[in-house]
Amino acid sequence: MTPETVDLDPAVRADGSVTHGDSAEEAPPVREPRHAPVAHLVRGGVVEGVHYGSVVVLGADGEVAFRLGDIEAAFYPRSALKPVQAVAMVRAGLPLDGALLSLAAASHSGEDRHLAGTLRVLELAGLAESDLRNVPDMPLDPGVRDAWVREGRTPSRLAQNCSGKHAAMLWTAKLNGWSLDDYLDPAHPLQQAVAETVEELTGQRVAQVTVDGCGAPLFSVSLHGLARAASRILTAAPGTPGSRVADAMREHAEMASGSGRDVAALMRAVPGLLAKDGYEGVQVAALPDGRAVAVKISDGASRARVPVTAAALARAGVDPDLLTQFAGEPLLGGGKPVGAVRPARALAPSPLATQA
């Protein structure tokens, strides 16, 4: 089913694409993505299953150093776009840094520190949890969620994994004198500012606009554009909004995700790495010299996202020894390891790629 699209303002073309930045390339084509095999489910030496997807690796010069699948088709980056949204808010005056700015770009696990941080942002803004317009949910982390169930706690807007971003959006809107009740409307000045930043950093016009799971506008770009945006954020000059967001997320990786989350472990394992995951099998990561990778797993499986991202980073020149813990979870048979999800041969040369 084709996602419902919404108008931003008169700057939306008749076909639903957005026309903000004059310097941006044309919007990526909306089509069925031409994905390729990117990972194999190998059991006992036999390929039992295949995950399809797309991968792009950018060199330090910004050029495509490797591609697999369809890196130019329009797709939704989901939460992997949050660093770009955070940059837009800082540009609009959001006065956060450190752990709370990392939380503004987070898909958090719902741990106590995440809830306390979100409440702190709201307090600084002179607002309350009732001002949030994201959907109520249970904590994202399974262990934290189970504890909530045992305690009889119910879904809340605060516990939902995007609450830090929503609190930051509210404060940004208030600082600029913009209305608060409709801050999620794509025509709202805040979301217009986000759309412009998306187009500037990805280098292309937004193809379509829909609604993300949390209720915020979601902008469709290409996988190539997403990698370009991450590279530009991480290589931004010191003290600029991009640099502030990148520094906050790298220095407070658990605030941008959570304890035990693979994206936080990846940032700790690879010096200087900025990484952000997104729902439906999306991952983006960038290195301080501008190298970047972006991954989309077509079936949304995280079990493929992690090893494929590791293989892409190895392709980008990251020492494979730093990535061994991300090579793929073991596949069990009778309680014992009998295989794993491994990157497909097309991602080789890499010690992380399957030999099946």
Image (cartoon, rainbow, N blue to C red):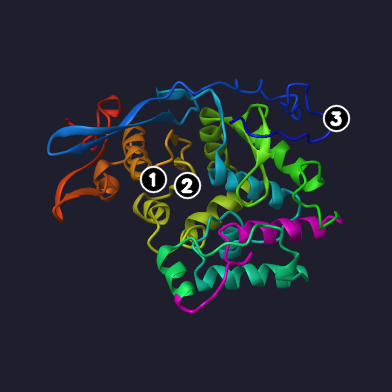
The disc at residue 277 is: 2
Disc with the residue nearer the chain's start (3 vs 1): 3
Q: CA distance from mark 3 to mark 2?
A: 32 Å
SS label for mark 2: strand
Which contiguous range is marked in magenta?
150-177
Circle 3 packing at 10 Å, graded few (<14), some (14-19), many (20+), is few
Crowd around label 2: few <14 · some 14–19 · many ≥20 (10 Å)? many
Identify the mark at residue 10; answer none if there is no mark: 3
Amino acid on which disc 2 is placed: Asp
Report the side of 50 relative to 331 (left or right).
right
User: What numbered label is drawn on residue 217?
Assistant: none
Residue 240 visible in the current orientation: no
Q: Relative to residue 70, is residue 195 depicted above or below?
A: below
> Where is residue 10 shown, x and y percent of the image?
85, 30
Residue 231 position in % (x across, y down)? 52, 37
User: Are the residues tagged 1 and 2 within 8 Å (C-beta)?
Assistant: yes
Label 1: which secondary element? helix
Q: Label 1 vs label 2: CA separation? A: 9 Å
Q: Amino acid at mark 1?
A: Ser
Report crowding for label 1: few under 14, some 14 to 19, many 20 or more residues within 10 A (C-alpha).
some
281 up-or-down from 214: above or below:
above
On residue 302, the disc is 1
Mark 3: amino acid: Pro
Q: Position of residue 242 (x, y in %)?
A: 61, 46
| Residue drawn at the location 44% of the way across and 63% of the way down | 141
Q: Earlier in the sequence, mark 3 or mark 2?
A: 3
Q: How many marks?
A: 3
